Amino acid sequence: MSKDEPLRLHVPEPSGRPGCATDFSYLRLSPAGTVRRPEVDVLPMDTRDLAYSLVSVLDAEGKAVGPWVPDIDIDMVRTGLRAMMKTRIFDSRMLLAQRQKKMSFYMQSLGEEAIGAAQALALRIDDMCFPTYRQQSILMVRDYPMVDMICQLMSNERDPLKGRQLPVMYSVKKAGFFSISGNLATQYIQAVGWAMASAIKGDTKIASAWIGDGATAEADFDTALTFAHVYRAPVILNVVNNQWAISTFQAIAGGEDTTFAARGVGCGIASLRVDGNDFLAVYSASCWAAQRARRNLGPTLIEWVTYRAGPHSTSDDPSKYRPGDDAAHFPLGDPIARLKQYLIGTGAWSEQEHEDTQKALEAEVIAAQKEAEQYGNMASGSVFSPAEMFEGIYKDMPEHLRTQRQQLGI
């Protein structure tokens, strides 16, 4: 009788530790233009190869190639580039404001700007996005006032949410931007439920949900996939695989020997794995998924392969868990630089226009910050009246709350 070897537990390791070089060979890349584009009514089981390859449109020279090249007006592409640039400038200014103690907390979307901006352009304004805290580019591309965003960040007297949300957790119904939740993966079940309700009412609106790679390990992720598949909910399920969930490498969430997109196929959901730093690929894949939803063909799960170029938040120091030059070596490059190269190649943009646009957007962000700070910030000590916590909760205030308010003398 043979003796079995002792069992061993496998613990995934990141591709690089601080002080080491990162090996990005684990990414499973596909050359631009080589991945097929199926018909919108494809069966979910027939998208398995798309869940393991990588949809990409822009090649190394900045040219759009292959079957996923979108039919998009060049002015819309220019709009997308400006929104991405504005998002990055806004993030930089708000990060500085947090360091100046004008707000308690901030989270950048550095390196991920194309994902929100391009999909927002592919959706309709009355569709509902269920974002996380790194999709501020959706609001930028929809021209939501930056003053209101900054007032929310600073929880000042003009904060549209009256200080009831953490900074960066916006809520803008008129812009199709559902209240951000700090509890990750809740976005999936909320979006699926909203989409199911839209279908029950016979409406034409679809939903789009966003989570990161780490949140796929949450139970809400699997619950949402089951309901989306069974009821063919008109929803796009986005997994932003930026390689890191705070300090935890994506392999810990199950991305080592498979892909996150493959989980959708296993649940009977059409799935794509897409270059998230390629604006044209993001727009094209989002249009494809939106069309499936509007034609009652069911949900689509899309894994966006990207890289979180900055810290997880202002409370994080990524130099403690990954090489400091990781972002510079990420093989999918910078989304803004890639789209800029494409537009210059088509003659619809130039280095001078890029420089002028950068300066104009910087001035716009600075002006919005100055205006917002007139209403106060954390450093100035502006706070809401205690009376605010009793307002806007109940249509008719319960008696016990009336009593409590009277006891406070307000």
Image: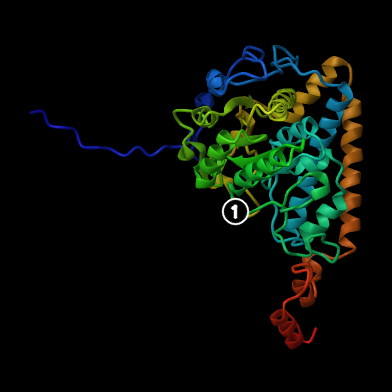
Inspect this view and state whether residue 252 appears: yes
- Answer above or below: position of 139 versus 399: above
In the displayed structure image, the side of residue 15 where residue 378 appears, left or right: right
Residue 387 percent across, percent down from the top left: 79, 76
Residue at position x 76%, y 52% in the image: 171
- Answer above or below: position of 353 versus 163: above
Residue 20 percent across, percent down from the top left: 49, 35
Tell me how many marks there are: 1
Quarter of the N terminus within the rendering: top left
- Answer above or below: position of 271 versus 127: above
In the displayed structure image, the side of residue 147 where residue 293 appears, left or right: left
Residue 4 percent across, percent down from the top left: 16, 32
Quarter of the C terminus within the rendering: bottom right
Compare residues 214 and 376 and report the one nearer the observer: 214
Residue 45 percent across, percent down from the top left: 53, 21
- Answer above or below: position of 146 versus 46: below
Compare residues 277 and 203 and report the one nearer the observer: 203
Residues packed near mark 1 inside 10 Å, few (<14), some (14 to 19) or many (20 plus): few
Query: For the residue marked with disc 1, what is the amino acid?
Result: Asn
In the displayed structure image, the side of residue 409 where residue 35 appears, left or right: left
Determine which quarter of the picture holds residue 290: top right
Q: Secondary structure at mark 1?
A: loop
Inspect this view and state whether residue 88 appears: no
Residue at the disc numbered 1: 183
Residue at position x 78%, y 63% in the image: 155
Residue at position x 75%, y 44% in the image: 136
Colouring chosen for the image of the structure: rainbow
Determine which quarter of the picture holds residue 213: top right
